[in-house]
Image (spheres, grey):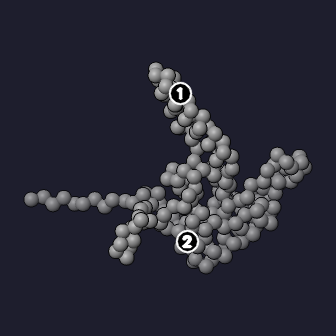
Amino acid sequence: MKLRRKKKRNSTRALMGLEGFTDYGIRTVGGELAVFLVQPTNISVLSHANVEQKEKRLCTLLSLLPGMEFVCLDSCERFDDNRRFLKQRITEEENPAVRAVLEQESGFLESKQIEMATARQFLIIWRFTRGEMPGQVFQDANEIGRKIADNGFEVRLMEKDNIKRVLGLYFGTSMTGEAVEDVDGAKNFDFDGRSGT
């Protein structure tokens, strides 16, 4: 009788190379990531000279910290795929009543997208090599944040809940940026032995 070897199934987190969260970012198989949230500046209201000054400061910052990585995200999920699907359905639909409902839905999605996706989030990621002591990483992350702020950018180190929210938007598990649970379905279960609400 042959014994079948059970394959070890990887979790989603393991497949993505994530090991967990720290006080200052994300621990990955390749090291730790410090995640900074940058407050955007509305350059449409700035003079040409002020925009040039911002550009020069960004160039200075890039020369000081050449390992920085930038991420730009919508503050909530985009509806582009849904809108394309509805447009296709409208052109294919023969029933006028159903077509009218699809057109209303398309209009609703468009207004919702304009309402929700006008704000962008700008992140700066800094990678630390594996094996650095947590205290040193925290100190270096604060120093990097100071250098970014010294060059005229309003920045703060993101905490676990904010990082989870951004990951939820990026991977499509959260549509509006609501809080993401540590354990899927945990809110529906009372770990003291009683069922949740």
Residue at x-position 82% and y-position 46%? 44
Q: Is residue 36 left or right of residue 161?
A: right
Q: Amino acid at mark 2?
A: Thr
Reply above or below: 83 against 188: above
Residue 50 location, x and y as percent? Answer: 88, 52
Q: Which mark is residue 28?
A: none
**Helix, strand or loop under label 2:** loop
Give the quarter of the image for residue 108: top right
Residue at x-position 47% and y-position 66%? 182
User: Which residue extends farthest bottom?
Assistant: 135
Residue 20 location, x and y as percent? Answer: 49, 67
The residues tagged by marks 2 and 1 sit, at their Cα atoms, a distance apart of 50 Å
Mark 1, Cα crowd under 10 Å, few <14 / some 14-19 / many 20+, is: few
User: Which residue extends farthest left?
Assistant: 1
Q: Is residue 183 left or right of residue 120?
A: left
- The answer to whether residue 128 is visible is no
Q: Which residue is mark 2?
A: 22
Q: Amino acid at mark 1?
A: Ala
Residue at x-position 89% and y-position 46%? 48
- Image quadrant holding the N terminus, namely bottom left
Could you tell which of marks 2 and 1 lies nearer the N-terminus?
2
Q: Are marks 2 and 1 in contact (CB under 8 Å)?
A: no
- Image quadrant holding the C terminus, namely bottom left
Q: Nearer the viewer, mark 2 or mark 1?
A: 1
Mark 2, Cα crowd under 10 Å, few <14 / some 14-19 / many 20+, is: some
Give the quarter of the image for residue 40: bottom right
Q: Which residue is mark 1?
A: 100
